[in-house]
Amino acid sequence: MPSLVLRERMENMSLVLVITIALFFGHIGDSEGGDLRKDFYKSACPLAEEIVKDITWKHVASNSVLPAKFLRMHFHDCFVRGCDGSVLLDSTAKHRAEKEAVPNQSLSGFDVIDKIKEKLEETCPGIVSCADILALVARDSVSFQFKKSMWEVLTGRRDGRISRQSEALSNIPSPFFNFASLKQSFANKGLSLHDLVVLSGGHTIGVGHCNFFSNRLYNFSGKGDQDPSLNPTYASQLKAQCKTLSDNTTTLAMDPGSPLSFDSHYYMALNQNQGLFQSDAALLTNKESSKIVSKLLDQDGFFTEFGQSMKRMGAVQVLTGSNGEIRKKCNVIN
């Protein structure tokens, strides 16, 4: 009899150990999204994601530059204090917000976010965060071209209450960065070299202002020279439109082949030394990242990888549970 009792106790202890290990590893496996999950609003606001998609698609249908704007807005949000909607906040009498930082001064589309938030507050007040709206809008705006969701967005983010101009300047990767600075900037957010190359593919849509790359045309090393890594024919085309170092109003497509189409053409242009920014060209200065660039020429492969990297970026330093708040309006804290 004692041996049976002992065996039963040992079996129970083993079971507890197995459950503990399973929970421990389950928690680790979950860390990519933290407490984010699929269908977070399914019971509290079942129409939430449908409302976001419908309003987004309606606006993108009449304004084809919005996908690039929203993708960039989400990226700039996640790199400052994590994906907490802080980029949406307006400045106050005491603090200048992220919106006022140089990298964010050309952001637009805030009015669309406000319309979506207004509709969601009518439908289910105080439930859907602005941070989640931005993550969904970035996905849905790009997806409009394909009439289907291009990647999964986990939800459950809460909104931050702090937005500082200085933090945007120090955290958002610069178009002037070299490879080492880019890699470090992404590593600071827990993102890999692979994520860096894949997310740079977002430059397949959108435009860049002349003053963010004209040094490559007119004064690359401070001697009135041109960046030798830049395709000479492409450089001539850029010079025809960006005539001075200080031009900060003229914009050019980041992907000269298909600026409004979300595709893998960016990597083709990159391989032909037609990356617009120094940070684009930098991807070819490292052996490992160059290999990834070549792999991403495959469009289906790029779409898959982009979705996975967006999911990882969308989980950077998120506020969940009882942290942060659910803003009533996206541009002001409650």
Image: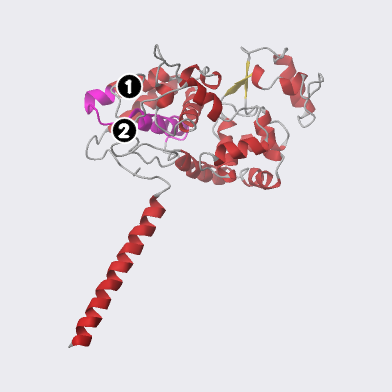
Residue 147 in the image: x percent, y percent?
42, 34
> Residue at the location (32% across, 63% down)?
20
Residue 257 in the image: x percent, y percent?
64, 29
Give whichever of 168, 207 is nearer the camera: 168
Residue 268 disc label: none
Provide the residue span drawn in magenta: 119-147
Q: From the viewer's perspective, is 7 left or right of 309? A: left
The residue beneath circle 1 is 333
> Is residue 123 magenta-colored?
yes
Give whichever of 49, 11 is nearer the camera: 11
Quarter of the image where the N terminus is located:
bottom left
Q: How many labels does the image show?
A: 2
Quarter of the image where the C terminus is located:
top left
Which residue is most to the left?
Answer: 1
Magenta part mainly helix, strand or loop? helix
Quarter assignment of residue 209: top right
Q: From the viewer's perspective, is 287 left or right of 206? A: right
Q: From the viewer's perspective, is 54 left or right of 166? A: left
Name the residue type under label 2: Glu
Name the residue type under label 1: Ile
The residue beneath circle 2 is 50
